[in-house]
Image: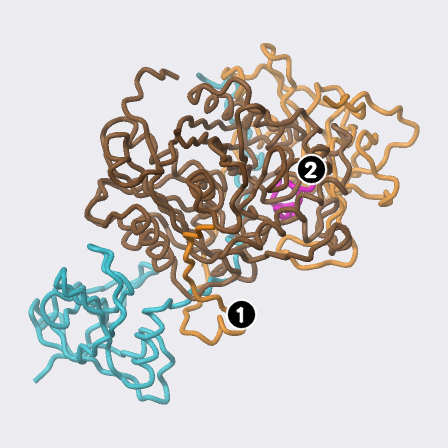
Amino acid sequence: MNLGKIHKDVAVVGAGMTLFSRRLQETGKEMSWQAAQMALDQAGLTLDDIDAVIMGSAPDAFDGVHKKGDWLIDGAGGVNKPYMRVYTGGGTAVFAPIAGWWHVASGMFERVLVVCEEKMSSCQPHAQSAFAHIWDPILDRPLKPNLVWIFAMEMQRYMHTYNVRYEDIALVAVKNKRNAVGHPCAQLADPDITLEDVINSEPMALPVRRLDISPPSDGAAALVLVSEDTAYELTNEPVWMDGVGWCIDSTMWTNRDLAFPKFVARAARMAYEMAGIKNPREEIDIAEPYDPFDYKELQHLEALGLADPGEAAIMTREGKTQRDGELPVCPSGGLLGVGNPIAATLGIKVGELFWQLSGQAGARQVPGDPAVGVAQAWGDLMQFSSVIVMRRRP
Amino acid sequence: MTFSEKFQKTTDVKHWLGDMEVDHFLYTAGIAGEAFFVALRDKGVILGTRCELCGITYVPPRIYCEHCFAELNEYTDVGLRGRVRSFTIARLGKDGNELKKPEIFAVIDFGSGTTGLLHKLGEVTPETVKVGLDVEAVLKPKSQRGGHITDIEYFRPVG
Amino acid sequence: MKETVKPRGKPLSGEEMKQVCHVVARPQVKYAWAVGVAMSHFLAGLKQGKILGRTCVQCERILVPPRMFCERCYRTTDEWVELPGTGVIETFSISYIDTDANRIKEPIFVGVLAFDGAPPHSGIMHYFGEVSQDAIHIGMPVEPVWKPGGERVGAITDIKYFRPREGARPSSNSKRRKRG
């Protein structure tokens, strides 16, 4: 990494997202447009002002459409513009803005639109059927696996290695589904959910129960990124992408340590170094780690250096990760509460940090004027992670 | 890097067979698509949306202009008549086998500045089809229309 | 407090989704995946009732599933070794859903095992059988239950499942790391 080669600081000046819902009538293109239009409106820009477009969308197999990014491009505002699609599974949610970041940081483009879309409802009988394509066709698929299995096995190993109690993990689902009550786009917000509800929900692949999992969703989200040269012309409250990092581990997942995701820690180290973060526990005010399953929030907090291995569960039990706690985690409501349209979770990770750090998060606003946040996503065959450190400047 | 051991035992397993485990995809037509197909099915008309700023009529309609991103929510009947912008004569089917009768596919404009609809031509031969040919939509009887692009059977030459 | 998210989108129920205009498309694709050099050898081994691994002398791993290259050292792996086939459970799940997310009554026991005679994390995913929900645990010694020789075709399913191995000593793999 050569920090001296970064030419421009990059700011988020607008964000947008659609409802997250089990099924939306809109086509993927229509959803992309709705989210992108909202982001442009927030930035006070029109499509004419945009120099380049980044499109993020996860597996083509969900839609049965080749080159999905290209297919969606008229809705994403990329017609007759430099365009690039990035795709790292769930990691796309934070990796697409990283791709936007390097377009601007390089000095090549002044204003970049980042659009992420996912329509999981097209895939019948269930998006799970398309997930089968993630497994190795020779070793894994003949065993007729369900994607939940790999999470269940990771969770089991995590609980065993660090002596973590299921009840503490389930509290993450309770917290996030309650946090989502403040989110106008939320699919599974529940103000009354209790720990017992999660513990007693149907077993899926134990230790994973139904309420430990985020729901499949349709949705889209977008960001507008600009350089330091024009950020203050557009807003008094730009939020800066001060550090970015990403890392991938081997596909040979049975040969991995399933308790601690080292690749997340490496991605975080890269982002912290760029942002000049020496002590993340002291310096980070808000975290939006990827939470497709409740235990993933804990594993990710630990890999992000915000807790020691096994400690994130205790912080959760003690209420430290609540919206008004010491370290608010997933104040958006996360994937568990707002929904999981894979790449489009951009809106509740980087989008949420933009709204939180610029004081525009409405009922979800974290108290105490937060200034520094970290967003993280994770995907592919449970092997990729992307991290962004965001800051509001005084 | 070379492998020290070459693949030589041809009796060993070489391939593993599989297929796409998805049963089917269900694509909603979307907001603009719903307006388009309901009008086609129930009224036998073809709808578009127009962006006055860019001077483009989208057929089939879209809820946004792809050039300026304006919201487009007024649907206009563009009529059943159009003009062939370009065409191709298909002599092989999608399985690669020769078709009994060639099929002609065309991009059809509905007035100037429209985006063009892909469809089949009928009542015309490979010898007589040409760019600029004026055509009109031949619809299935109302009772057989289901809100699909195939509710239009084909386009045929006018006059 | 300022709220700037103005969400759009028309949610549909499952029934409504079938009532709005839509198109149904069925994928018609067949694949023949090349198994490759290492996996071909491994599958041929399974047919003979053997678990084969590939050594890398540089990182001192035995790679199972085997590869002709070590992805860490990025060099050609060195030689084939036969492992005893026994191992310990590294992690497991008790699944009440099948591959299409349908609920099933009799749960599937599935997990990752690490093979004996190889460094930690050298193993594969497979089913576990002849074990109860209360008894199964991380660190449990297991052994393969093979299909009869005549029924084996050179597939991962030539092993029916792994079952508890009676009289085996618990492996060091079951030890917990201290927290913090």
Position of residue C66 measured from the top left corner of the image (x, y, whole percent) = 60, 26
Q: Which residue is mark 2?
A: A316
Instruction: Say which quarter of the image contains residue C133.
Output: top right
The residue at the point 28 percent across, 36 percent down is A226
Q: Which contiguous range is marked in magenta?
A: A140-153
Q: Marks 2 and 1, Cα distance to the nearest angstrom?
A: 35 Å
Q: Is residue A108 left or right of residue A124?
A: left
Q: Which chain is brown?
A: A
The residue at the point 48 percent across, 41 percent down is A349
Q: Which chain is orange?
A: C
Q: Which chain is cyan?
A: B
- In this view, the residue in front, A389 or C153, is A389
Against B4, residue C151 (above or below) is: below
Position of residue B82 measured from the top left corner of the image (x, y, whole percent) = 13, 75
Secondary structure under the numbered disc 2 in the rendered image: helix
Q: Which residue is mark 1?
A: C13
- In this view, the residue in front, B27 or C48, is B27
Against A83, residue B70 (above or below) is: below
Predominant secondary structure, magenta span:
helix
Against B67, residue A271 (above or below) is: above
Q: Is residue C152 left or right of residue A4?
A: right
Position of residue A39 measured from the top left corner of the image (x, y, whole percent) = 34, 49
Q: Chain of mark 2?
A: A
Q: Quadrant of the N terminus of chain B?
A: top left
Q: Chain of mark 1?
A: C
Residue lying at the far right in this picture: please name it. C167
Q: Quadrant of the C terminus of chain B?
A: bottom left
